Amino acid sequence: MIAAVPASLASRRRLLGALAATAVPLPAAAQPARVTIRLSHVVTRQTPKGLTMERFQQNVQQASAGRIQVVIYPNSLLYGDADEMQALQLGAVDMLAPSLSKFGAIGFPEFELFDLPFLFGARAQVHRITRGPVGQALLDGLAHQGLVGLGYLDNGFKHMSANRPLLAPQDFAGLRMRVQSSRVIARQMRVLGARPVVLAFGEARRALALGVVDGTENPISNFWTQRMHEAQLDLSLTAHAWLGYAVVAQRRFWDFLGAHDRHLVLTALQEALAWGNTIAQQENDAALAALRASGATRIHLLDEGRRERLRQGTQAVYEQLEPRTAAWLERVRAALET
């Protein structure tokens, strides 16, 4: 079983219930002259996702001459990991940019294939999937839950942190590792001998400081901007898996916009995502430089031999995939081989 540390969500759930009870869909023909798009996410502004969402905001407001306003709620200010997907489905927010892991919990386990350890060896391989037919088919499938998949955003490869180096499978033994709510990531930790603990991203830094968990996995930009280096002595550059996001809208809201505004918003988003996917690696490089300069955390490189042993130590994860995810994995592998 995955160990979970529950958050206090009573007030948010009451709000979501009230919104669901009182929401009255507006017909597309009643499109108002002015539109407000509520967009929530869980990371800080100075991250690839935070910066990209702000660029999207600027693009929309400039293209619409201010008629369409994008209001951003960053850093779990409005909703967090535990409730943002429910908030979107109920119409409490209009757009999200959740990590791909979160779609498994609402009936799309195929998105968890992005959590598989050592599936991708380079950003170009990731982009071959997210920018190709397989990635589009995954987004199209979200329509079954009343969502509109609009595009993908990089955050970069994840690395392992703890208060000791994590360079070989045996180094994970007994550690409580904070994970997203993903069965694939939980299995990854178990096969390494660690105990997965599901925590919302916004709670991870405090949990590390209090010793509730011993370590975690993150792209370096998240590790740095959340100040995890203040609670973790060691960061091992494992680059074992990729963290990405999908920008999604609620279907009723999207239809309400009308064809002209949908085109305007989508065009603004596509430019922002292209820009964001360009700067993601730059932000991670800058965060690594800042982390080195701080001297707060020891940084460990893995040579090819160690990385291969770590890869071999996680291969059991692939043997435990459910059939639906395994079928999508075959499509991904076929696309990577072409």
Image (spheres, helix red, strand yellow):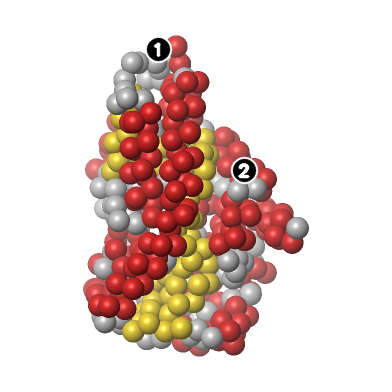
Task: Categorize mark 1 by other alpha carbons within 10 Å: few (<14), some (14-19), many (20+).
Answer: few
Q: Position of residue 253 (x, y in %)?
A: 43, 27
- Check whether the beta carbons of the residues at disc 1 and disc 2 lie within 8 A of each other: no
The residue at 31%/20% (across/down) is 34
Task: Place residue 215 in its image quadrant.
Answer: bottom left
Q: Position of residue 261 (x, y in %)?
A: 44, 23
In 3D space, how far apart are the residues under numbered discs 1 and 2 (Cα atoms)?
Answer: 30 Å
- Total labels: the figure holds 2
Amino acid on which the number 2 mark rests in the picture = Gln
Q: Position of residue 99 (x, y in %)?
A: 45, 53
On screen, 260 above or below 76?
above
Residue at which label 2 appears: 136
Provide the secondary structure element on which disc 2 rests.
helix
Taking the image as shown, residue 15 lies to the left or right of residue 301, namely: left
Amino acid on which the number 1 mark rests in the picture = Ala
| Viewer can see residue 84 | no
Task: Place residue 94 in its image quadrant.
Answer: top left
Taking the image as shown, residue 195 lies to the left or right of residue 223, namely: right
The residue at 24%/43% (across/down) is 11
On screen, 8 above or below 156?
above
Residue at which label 1 appears: 30
Provide the secondary structure element on which disc 1 rests.
helix
